[in-house]
Image (cartoon, rainbow, N blue to C red):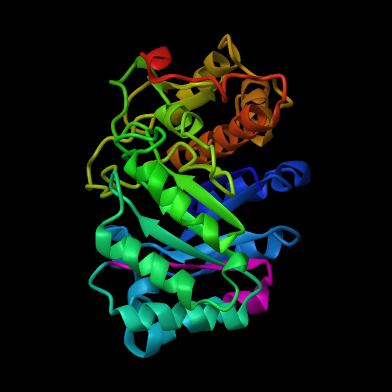
Amino acid sequence: MQYVACLRVGQNDIKALINLEPERRDVFTPLLDMRGDDDRHLQTFLATWTDHPFFLDVSRVRKDVGEDFIGGNDLHNASDAFENKQQFFLNTQQSNNNIIPVISWTDDDPQRDVIQLALSAERNFNQIAIRVFCPEKPTSASWARLLSILDSLNLPNFAHVVLDFGATSPASTAAGSEFNHSLKQLNVYNLQSVVLLSTSFPIDKPASNTSRSSACYDVAWQSNIDRNGINPSPTYGDYAATNPTAPMEYIPGMPVLPFGCYYTPTEWWQRRKGGNKEFANYIEIAQEVRSLPGYHGDDFCWATREYSRIVATSTGYGNNGTWNGYRINQHICAMILSITDDANEEFDELDFDDLI
C-alpha cells in the first residue's frame, strides 16, 4: 500500500474506483466514507473490488449524517459499543472479506464504547484502522484516546492509524516538532501503516468560461516530513481531487455549469465552459484536456480513454456527476504514477515555494 485516497460513497466516486486497473489496485487502497440514502453504490463496489483491501468508515460530514442510511441505521449511536456500526461492518464483511473497518469518533463519544468497538473489530477482522481527525493537530483528548485504543489491542501490529488533517496541515513537520514527536510515539506499536490524509482541492470553481490552475499542497507538506526514526514511514493520502469541507447543498434553480479538471503534478487545471446544463460543452473541454502540456495520453486511464471517446464521437459526454468520476479516476492514476515512478523525483523534493 503506497497511496490511500478517501472518498464519500456515491455513484461516480465508485465508478472512478472500479475502473482502476488491477496493477493500480495493487499499490492503492481506498478509504470509503459511507453515506447516501441506501447502500446500492457500496454494494456495487463490494461486488467489484474483490481482490484488494479497502478501508470503510461511516461519514461524519453533516449532510451525510442526515441522509437515510446513516440516520435510519443509527450508525453513530454509541450504545452497546456502537452495536449498529459493528453490525454494519459485519454485514459488509459477508459481501467482501477484504474490508478493514475504521474506528473513528468525536471527542464527545464515550471512551469505553469507542475502545470496545475497536476490540470487537479486532476480534472479527484480520486488520483494523483507527482514524484520528486532526484539524492542524489532534486534540489532546483524541490523541490520548488513540493511544488508549492501541494499548488495549491484543495485536496492535495488525492495526493501521489514519491521521486525517482534512483541509489543513500541521504547523510544522520538521524534526522535533509536535507532529514529529507524535509520529515517534507510535513506533512502539509496530503498526501495519500510518496514513496521512489531507486535501487542498479548491472549494470554489473558476468563473464561467474561464480556466485556472490550482496548486496541490498535499504532496508538498507530506513529502517534506522528517522521517528519520519513524517506523513505519507514513503513507501518502489525500481526498482524490475532492474536498469534504466544500459546500454540498444543491439549491433548486442553482445553475449547473460544465466543469472539467485534470491533475498534472503538482497542480489541478480547472475549466468551466458554457451555461446552465449546457453539457455539450464537455466535448470541447475534453479536447482542451487532451491538449494540455502535461496530458498523460489517451490510453493512460479510464478517464483519458473517455475523453478521447467523447472527442471522437461527440456523444455520451455525460454531465457534471460523470465528470466528477473522471476527475477522481485521473487524479488517482496520476498520483500513483508520481509515487511509484522511480525516475520521478518531484514527489521527494517538493517545497511549498515551488507551488507559488
Q: Horizontal and vertical percent for residue 164?
A: 40, 50
Judge whether residue 104 is colored magenta. yes
Compared to residue 170, the image places residue 34 above or below, namely below
> In screen coordinates, is 344 left or right of 113?
right
Q: Horizontal and vertical percent for residue 226?
A: 48, 34
Closer to the camera in the image, 117 or 77: 117
Res 65 seen here: yes
| Residue lying at 50% horizontally and 69% vertically, measured from the top left | 39
Q: Quadrant of residue 258?
A: top left
| Residue lying at 58% horizontally and 49% vertically, measured from the top left | 231
Q: Horizontal and vertical percent for residue 311?
A: 62, 21
| Residue lying at 47% horizontally and 37% vertically, measured from the top left | 319
Judge whether residue 292 is colored magenta. no
Region rendered in magenta: 91-106
Closer to the camera in the image, 163 or 22: 163
Closer to the camera in the image, 231 or 18: 231
> In screen coordinates, is 352 left or right of 328?
left
- So how many labels did they put on this image? 0
Compared to residue 172, the image places residue 120 above or below, namely below
Res 77 seen here: no
Q: Horizontal and vertical percent for residue 268?
A: 45, 23
- Quarter of the picture containing the C terminus is top left
